[in-house]
Amino acid sequence: MSGIAGIISKRKQPKAAKEVKQLLKKIRHRGSRQETLLEKNGCCLGMVSNDSMPQDSSALVDGRIYNIDQVSKRHGLNFRPGYPDGKKIKELVDAEGPSIIKEFQGAFSLALADFSNNFYLARDTIGIKPLYFVQDSDRVVFASEIKSLTGYGDKVAEFPPGHVMKNTFLPREYDSIEIGDYDFLQSMGAAEITDKLDQLLQDAVKKRIEGQQGEIGVWLSGGVDSSLIAALAKKFTSRLYTFSVGFEGSPDLEASRVVAQALGTRHIEHKLDLDQLYQTIPEVIYHLESFDAPLVRSSLGNMIASRISSRSDIVFSGEGGDEVFGGYNYFLDFDSSEKIQQELIKAINSLHNTALQRVDRLANAHNVKVRLPLLDENLIDFALTIPTKHKVKKAKNISKYILRKVAERYLPYEIAWRDKEKFWEGAGIQDTLTEKIEKNINDEYFEKNRKLDSGFKLRNKEEMYFYQLFKEYFGQVDVANILSFTQDFN
């Protein structure tokens, strides 16, 4: 767990260190054990972390790059055992330039000062780790979360995924998720594709466990994604915790119990209480930094799941399965492979400020390190070459078909083929919460105030309530620069 912040300037900033300390103070929850400041030419990079960091490192990373040693060897750099990853990154960028970042695999936002006193910011291709910035004529101020930058006016912007910034120029793209040749595997049979996918899934989980000390857990909803990840994680650890939340009698709790019993995990569940859930909303919106109603709903469950799983050193999530393998029901509406593939890319590229924003913020609020194996680069590259006929079976009304074929190797049949439900539906959140909120806003007030200055129309009373709370925390920020909104609104 880490958070980064800093100032990169064309001119000396005599008070940069003091200013950066204030930026870090607002994201102290992302890493309370250690603070590092790097100062060069009046610029200052800062980091809070729960991990040990060498004080002389000039690359500060929120997240983890899994293939840093392989990239180093590929470019002729052989580092001694224990050599800090920050120094490896610095030497790679100094030797090869910022284009080397395209070869990094993992979840990361990084700030770097190289040997030539160039300053860089970069973010992973999918946007698993967050980064925001404010730019004026002679400096950039950046931080892992919006709340650090609320005193800098309304021009706070999201740093785009797959981009790098050198000194104080605008971010430029170094990588992106593309459609690719989705007919590449047309000659491969379904069984062979399933075998290959199974192996890549195992590899994605294994590399996120290797070298990990302490307790390992999984956020378990009882859906195919999280259940499959739990089953694969159990292959690589003798003791696995699973954590589930929902109202008593909800489908998610019942399905999760089935999975936990089948896998033999140490299962911990939390039964939701409506009043407790309602009282949690302000805290959720402060950490989430969004008022998108479907996102807030699902984040309420994430908040509770993060609280009860904080005992684990790392927690796995099944986030990304619906986007990579076509799990949403709307994929069943498309008639062409080309359209399905385009929508898969669109869904993956929307993750960074929707579902991944939820996962990152709520986990960091409770000192939880989350691992997302379904967003592994090698897995995505392969998945995007699988013909769409193996993902979406319109005639059978089945989405995520090929992933379910892998899942049925490890899980009870009724779990592998369980129908897709949104988290707030499966956990039982939607009806109970919406009814309570809508009692507080009358129809006349809603119609009069639903249109925002940005032109966005609040879609229902629930979202209006969330927006009112959001504005208390982030009122100056122009939401058009930082948010997107869930289109599939229930």
Image (cartoon, rainbow, N blue to C red):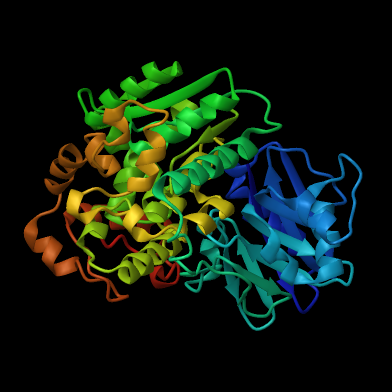
Relative placement, left or right, of 235 versus 251 is: right
Q: Give the residue at x 59% y 40%.
A: 203
Of residues 407 and 233, the one drawn nearer to the viewer in this rendering: 407
On the image, the x and y values in percent for residue 253 come to 29, 26
Relative placement, left or right, of 62 versus 453 is: right
On the image, the x and y values in percent for residue 244 come to 37, 27
Relative placement, left or right, of 138 versus 269 is: right
Q: Give the residue at x 64% y 68%.
A: 141
Observer able to see residue 28: yes
Quadrant housing the N terminus: top right
User: Does residue 461 sit above or below 194 in this rendering?
Assistant: below
Of residues 378 and 313, the one drawn nearer to the viewer in this rendering: 378
Of residues 435 and 413, the one drawn nearer to the viewer in this rendering: 413
On the image, the x and y values in percent for residue 49 come to 69, 42
Quarter-of-image position of residue 237: top right
User: Does residue 366 sit above or below 67 in this rendering?
Assistant: above
- In the orientation shown, which residue stands out farthest toward the left? 443
Q: Give the residue at x 86% y 60%.
A: 91
Number of numbered discs overlaid on the protein picture:
0
